[in-house]
Image (spheres, helix red, strand yellow):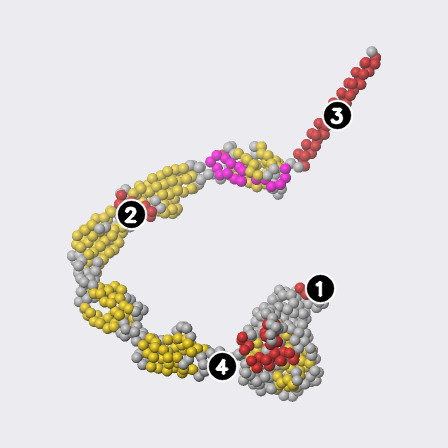
Amino acid sequence: MPQAIDTRIKQAQRRGAGVYILSGFFTMMVLLGFIFWLFLIKGYSLLIGPTEAATSAKVDLASGLAWVSDSKVYTLGGDVSITISADTFETVQLAIDEQSPSTLEVILLPSPAVINAQAILDDQRASRNDYLSESQWYLNANLVHVGKVLSYKTPPGKYHLEATNRYYESASETLILARAEQVDAKLILQSVEGSISINSAPQGIDVSIDGVSKGKTPLTIVAKGGEYQVVLLSDEYKTIQDSVDVLTKFLHPTRNYQLLARPGVLNISAKPEGGLLLINNVEYALGSIELPANKSHKIEYKKAGHSSFIKTITLDKRKPVNIQVVLEPLYGQVVVNTNVPALVSINGSSTERAPLSKRLLAVENKLEVSADGYRTIKQTFTPRPNKSMSIDITLVTEFEARRREGKPLFVNTLGITMQKFRANAFTLGSPANETGRRRNEHEVEVDFSRPFWVSETEITQSQFTAFLGAGQSVKSNLPVTGVSWLEAAQYTNWLSEKEGLPVFYRFQNGRFAGVNASSNGYRLPTEAEWEWLAKKSRRAVSTLYVWGNQEKLRDNLGNFADKTMNGKQLIFFDTYSDGKTGVAEVGSFKADRAGLYDLDGNVSEWVHDYYTNGLPDTSQRHVNYLGSPRGESWVIKGGNFETGRLRELRAAYREYSATGKPTVGFRIARYDN
């Protein structure tokens, strides 16, 4: 027995422990729920106005994690959207996020009232003419619509509605509108009554109004507001058709008509068309023409290359006159002769070989004569009717024709554009006090007696490889670089030979042997020409740089070592950007004042002059200065895409080399004569 009691006691203890465990678990869950509520759930209170809306307001969740209870919103974080609605008020959608205040004030706007109004006219005639579409609707004296029917939303309140029409008296009605109320209104427009007076000179002309005969002029009839079609008809005079309005603001319109005598009618056609028709020396178009009756009229019809038509007629106002004109073509014989075998085309027709004899219409004809290697000649001529004429054409070679015109020849076929300059005296080099000056920038007084041509851009890879011959062609607008001064000089001689010009540079056994200074063949620009272009051309005074005297570089001014060269070379412009990495295609930047491209940058350029350490002759002004007559290397001018010092962009700055460099190219020049 005592053992059984002990067993029951232990069982009871175990049950008590289970209760304690369950109780503790429940308490923990409540505590966790409170913590969850305290730290994760955020509540918002809504203040809804006005009072009329608040009593029936309803709040619904539109999107997001939240629940809504009356005017409370509880969110689990993130963006939430709710809608607030109330009877006869406009629904509002509200976005709630972590930045929203805990109390949100929402004001609902009253739903607008809707006016549905219709204008009605008191007679059927107006409806037939669609006068209702012109009705104007005013609300509190403000025009809100034009048309037969008005459908208009407006805030609740008291309004004065008015409908007007130019042919009818206006009608109005006072409306008191509640929220969301729809009101139907019909406004009857009363017709007005006026009169129409018709007078004419002469009098006694039949009058019909809207197709109904009303009598003879002078005439006055009673008429309601509206539009009326008036016709005055007579056998002796031209018919008059008019539109007359009887308006609310103009009830008694009067018309005074001056009738014109009924004309005669001439119907005239012609073959061929496109000629000139004159009647009494006045130009007309073919077709039906009204002219005074019982008078004589001179009719003329002309067309180039055809016989003319002339006739005098008298017209009867009761019976039209019909004339059909046929002109006979006129021809002449033309013979075309040329000094060399050539092809002849007349008016763009198929070409034939000269000499050529043709029978042609005696009108202006277009002649085109061409032959390989010769300048094409185009001209116009007019054959003489029934006679023969001879046209003698002298063709000259394309090169000779261009030389006569003073224009470059072969260079154009390579895409090289030249500009002509007439330079004036200036000082080559730089003064001793110029910032960044080097000792080799000797001051030399120079002048120019011969105009010269210079290429707008540096010579490209494409333009240079044409000189190298078959198998060397490269299509690239990048400037050619790495070529030696001798190769550049040989290229200019090649251009001269292509155009039949005397070469400027003399070579013996592939070695440079001097120049022909009197030649107008192609060459490299002299240092004096280059520097004049860089700092004097189209300027009142010499400038320090190609772009002027400004020390600060504007972005995209030219192709220099900009900030993209950081890490690629030690010296660069760290605040400048030109949008290019390395060498750029010629003409990528804006032209300078002289109209030339890349004179200050992209690649440096060979010029004609020898480079020497010796001092130049400064005792005189040099005309057409070619520099030193001897040296071991040649002068290089201008900056390039690796130039990172401002002093090296000065127009007077000069470098030298005996061999080609990857940063050096060239442009071409030649004397004009």
Q: Does 77 appear in magenta?
A: yes
- Kindly identify the residue that appears in the image at 68 percent across and 32 percent down: 33
As measured in the structure, the alpha-carbon distance from the residue carrying label 2 to the one carrying label 3 is 95 Å
Identified at 56% across, 80% down, the residue is 498
How far is mark 1 from mark 2, CA to CA?
A: 85 Å
Q: Earlier in the sequence, mark 2 or mark 3?
A: 3
- Tell me how far mark 2 sits from mark 4, CA to CA: 78 Å
Question: Spatial distance from mark 4 to mark 1, Cα to Cα?
Answer: 56 Å
Q: Nearer the viewer, mark 2 or mark 4?
A: 4
Verify CB contact (< 8 Å) between mark 2 and mark 4. Answer: no
User: Is 259 positioned to the left or the right of 77 in the image?
Assistant: left
Q: Is residue 417 visible?
A: no
Quarter of the figure with the N terminus:
top right
In the depicted structure, whether residue 163 falls above or below residue 654: above
The magenta span reads 76-93
Q: Which mark is residue 397?
A: 4
